[in-house]
Amino acid sequence: MSDGETTEQAIDRLVERSLAHAVFTGRREFLALVGASTAAAALASVFPVAAAKALAQEKLGPPEKKDLKVGFIPITCATPIIMAEPMGFYRKHGLNVSVVKASGWAMIRDLSINKETDATHMLSPMPLAISMGAGSQGVPYVMPAVENINGQAITLATRHKEVKSAADFKGFKFAVPFDYSMHNFLLRYVVAEAGLDPDRDIQIRVVPPPEMVANLRAGNLDGYLAPDPFNQRAVHEEVGFIWMLSKDIWPGHPCCAFAARREMSETAPNTFGALFRAIVDATRYAHERKNRKEIAAAIAPRNFLNQPLEVVEAVLTGEFDNGLGQKLSVPDRIDFDPFPYQSMAVWILTQMKRWGYVKGDLDYKAVAEQVFLADQCRQVMKSLGVRAPEKNMVAHVFAHGRQKTFDPTRPEEYLKAFPIKRV
């Protein structure tokens, strides 16, 4: 600590130095060339520095704004965001939050971009896409925490019980909830690994999750890769069966997440920090399986999921009927782990490029670091007594497909090895 420097000022200086070390290569030359103030301004343009400082000091001031609106889609992936209202996690962290239900992902995106919500439930690819201006106007977003891992499935109409392999999907009509979704990318991955081209051999439509079961019943769809509870709801209504859980494609894959405009994290760092802590706290609670029935009862009612309690319990507990007369016990059918590995972002970006959603050269690591706030999540997890990973990037092991291990340090090499792609 320098003479006359307070503890808080010292922490701020260390945070800025650490971030510069992480972001700028040749940082000494860069600082000598542009000066410290210019470097700090450049860093702030791509990183929520104020929020990082507040979180590092672990003593947030009073929230700049206590009354907040947080958007959500009525699916079990949103469990931490939803349950935090009726179960008091927002109040615990000094906030008065109303969760705002949206019918589809385009609506959730537009509410957030237009500042009609303060923060939002998003599919984990969405903050990456919006930040890059893919599929919408470009607005910088941050994704400080994953909400759920696993928690999806491929559900087929009951007339397709003879299907043995994804190669049998040729000519099928599938639904996914959004183009920029793990659902879309995992479905494409499975279909392509079976030798089919997802853009030519099947049809993929965007259908809001609450409308999927009705479309399956009406014969408009052969199946969907969707979030729950709509896989289990199809079984409940005897119109479909669960063909494959998404955890059997990529165990521990990210699904939905907590996201906010980067502007919000910078202009209201105390509010952002309190909201961040509330979400991570709720996610920690949801991870404990002993709490799942209590949570199901809190989120099943009409103002939240509007689903039968037995359907929500089947999803959250992993004790379920798959629609083929089998009673299964899969405790990690859905799980809750907030850590946003930046390597997950890199995999998502490879698939966005693979299928033509982004074009040209892509700095995978830089985009991942700007959007997936792994360092801040680690700080929040540790402050709440939750064990946090030490690395932001790890290799991911797939249970399905030929390339079993994804090395995030070699994304282009990984991408080039796929025989079916749009690149």
Image: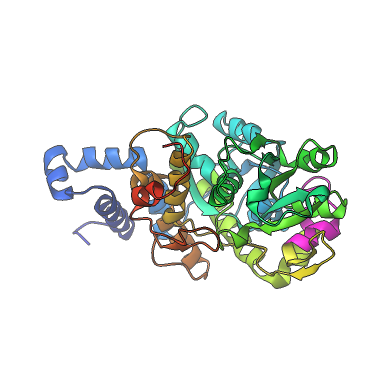
The span shown in magenta is: 298-315
Q: Quadrant of the C terminus?
A: top left
In the displayed structure, 231 sits above or below 284; it is: above
Is residue 273 visible to the viewer in this orientation of the structure?
A: no
Query: Is 49 left or right of 90, judged from the image as shown?
Result: left
Q: Nearer the viewer, residue 342 or 293?
A: 342
Quadrant including the N terminus: bottom left
Point out residue 374 in the picture as x, y percentages from the top left corner: 43, 56
The number of numbered badges drawn on the structure is 0
Identify which residue is drawn at 73% across, 53% down.
Answer: 163
- Residue 95: give x, y in percent of width and height: 62, 49
Image location (x, y in percent) of residue 307: 83, 50
The residue positioned 27% from the left and 42% from the top of the image is 40
Q: Check residue 309 for magenta coloring.
A: yes
Task: Provide residue 299's location: percent of width, then percent of height.
Answer: 77, 54
Looking at the picture, tell me which residue is in the foreground, 317 or 6. Answer: 317
Is residue 265 one of those drawn in magenta?
A: no
Near-viewer residue (207 or 41): 207
